Image (spheres, rainbow, N blue to C red):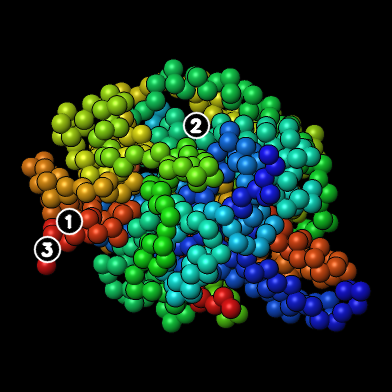
Amino acid sequence: MAAAHKPKLAVWKFASCDGCQLSLLDCEDELLAVADAVEIAYFPEATRAVVKGPYDVSLVEGSITTSHDAERIQKIRKQSKCVITIGACATSGGIQALRNFADVAEYTKYVYASPGYISTLAASTPISSHIYVDFELQGCPINKLQLVEVLNAFLHGHKPNVASHSLCIECKRRGIPCVMVAQGIPCMGPVTHAGCGSICPSYNRGCYSCYGPMETPNTASLAAWFGKLGTDRADVVRKFRTFYAGKDAYRKESERHEQR
Amino acid sequence: MSNAKKSRTIKVDYMARVEGEGALFLKIRDGKVSDVKLKIFEPPRFFEAFLRGRKWTEAPDITARICGICPIAYQSSSISAMESIVGAKIDGPIRELRRLVYCGEWIESHVLHMAMLHAPDFLGYEDAIQMAKDHPDVVKNALRLKKIGNELMTVVGGREIHPINLRVGGFYRTPTKKQLLAMRDDLLWACDASVALTKLVSTFEFPDFERDYEFVAMRHPGEYPLWEGRLVSNRGLDIPIEDFFKHFEEEHVKHSTSLHSFVKLRGAYHVGPLARFNLNFDRLTPRCRELAQEIGVTPPCTNPFKSIVVRGFETLYACEESLRIIESYEEPEKPFIELAPRAGRGHGCSEAPRGICYHTYAIDDNGVITDARIAPPTAQNQRTMEEDLAAFVPRHADLPDDKLTWRCEQAVRNYDPCISCSCHFLRLHVDRD
Ligand code: SF4
Ligand code: SF4
């Protein structure tokens, strides 16, 4: 059965480090197969060629930080059958959402000598606060195997097999001794979305939650544990304010510990 | 005919096959470039601002996120800067592992650039996937080579993008000798594959274009530079890295939205593979130097289009250096040295695949960062890229618009620019109409 056309894939970038789209190019073993299964219609990091929309699948990296980008994402939604956001920036505002807790004018003055030329929004927001998103893949950066799974699922019309439980389950599966219990190292694993394969605990360090909050995380309980381990309040704030600072669950927990 | 036109405008609204968002704009009047702008519209991400208030130990994890293509460069420079504050000197196996993980990044980034992003320019393809249809083995071998770079980053750093294992003082966990030796056969293959790739790219047709650059790179007494060294140039600069801002200055140029770096009182300079190669040829391995002789690309090499060949030499170097390290590696007793913070300022610089990446931080007695400044390589090259375009276009003004546009894009891609490094890459004016 000959398909009328290969599904068209577009990859878009907003405020980000490019790491998540690089994950696609880092699929060394799968890249040529992916390129066979879809038509790479728009992906400026990889190709000069531009095929006009509409697109079957749009992968969106990066967060919205300028008014121009807030308009651009609307146009992308209109041209895309399905929008998948990839990474912490696109799903939560990313590390640049640290500005949401600060005065952007002061930030601008600190970084740029001519702050007047800078046009930027006061907050860095995820794509889903602007448009409907069909699927969000978490991670800073995303796991490339999960990306292949998600693409595959959308191309074949089934639900992506991406677990939403906590990182702790991944540690148990891999038989990694808990760094918090065994070594007293504060670890964000209990409230962190699975997906990385528990890299940090396997390297004797606590998770710093580059995969962001799991579904319904009990952040208050974990913060209380940190207290018992001797983590001071400022450090608790920092722990909840990294790559997923913009996510409600983490934002609220960080604000609870902020000394005013 | 287009060459008969008196006035032409070359516009590329979105530069492809570079990292980050940039555009190119050139105005040509009577065969001369009257305006050249490499516009950067990457939105500001404010790293230097929000680093204030973070712990010094967090800098490597946070600055990695400036750029997904060269996270090790940011991690290395921030770690060196922090260690310099407390006067720590890291030697032995930990230092070797740092070079090893950096070699992984060089291999990954250089091969990505050479084969996937830049070779298609020379061969006339829109991208590497198109190219793969006619040259399947070239692309497959390049992918395998790139993967070996990524594996080095994973085995030492824990992950290929934003590694988790690098810390101030060393590593969280060091690999076993066995884990490293498992990479040996792959690396032996990689040496041969990088020779083959280099030979292949050296057969490309290079525009006849040379410029008299001030090359700036690090220089180390005994090694090809990666993590440590002084800053030197072919015009007599020879300074410790802490003097960076005494000699380099960042200026806001009216016509451009971005920040340009200059050598004080002299002007634009060139960082990256070509600069390292010209200034450190004697520090390459014999095999690299022989390959360079055989191919006929030796210092002084001042044709920026040939940087693709030089990336090949550096890829071979990184593969050979990795082999040397894994073979002589001895597992350290402890993966890191415990360091206590004290108030002060420190400086760090390392050689990212695309050139020197300089950081300076001040911290207080509790290790909380109070000031941060970062000069990423692409920002330093930006002025040079514009000057290249201004010099290149008049000589090739007879090309039809589409060809000239492609060549101009390529002239920028020579630098493998990494525009997402928008920490303070630019004084930015968002203007994208
Ligand atoms: S989520 Fe992380 S890896 Fe992905 S683009 Fe953002 S900063 Fe980069
Ligand atoms: S363990 Fe946590 S911080 Fe480490 S890679 Fe996984 S999600 Fe990220």
A104 is higher (above) or lower (below) than A63: below
Looking at the image, tell me whether mark 3 or mark 1 is earlier in sequence order.
Answer: 1
* Chain to which mark 3 belongs: A
User: Percent position (x, y) of residue B39?
Assistant: 59, 71
- Give residue A259's mark: 3
Q: Which residue is mark 1?
A: A253
- What is the quadrant of the C terminus of chain B in the image? bottom right
Question: In what quadrant does ligand 2 lie?
Answer: top left
* Residue drawn at the location 70% of the way across and 42% of the way down: A2
Residue B236 quadrant: bottom right
Instruction: Measure the alpha-carbon separation of dots 1 and 2.
Output: 37 Å
Label 3, residues with CA under 10 Å away: few <14, some 14-19, many ≥20: few
Count up the numbered dots: 3
SS for tag 3?
loop
Q: Is residue B209 visible?
A: yes
Mark identifier at residue B152 = 2
Q: What is the x, y in percent for residue A73?
A: 48, 67
Give the camera-side residue of A158 and A249: A158
What chain letter is assigned to the residue under label 1? A
Q: Residue furthest top?
A: B178
Q: Are marks 3 and 2 on the same chain?
A: no
**Could you say where residue A1 lies in the image, as x and y percent from the top left?**
68, 39
Would you place residue A183 above or below residue B204 in this image?
above
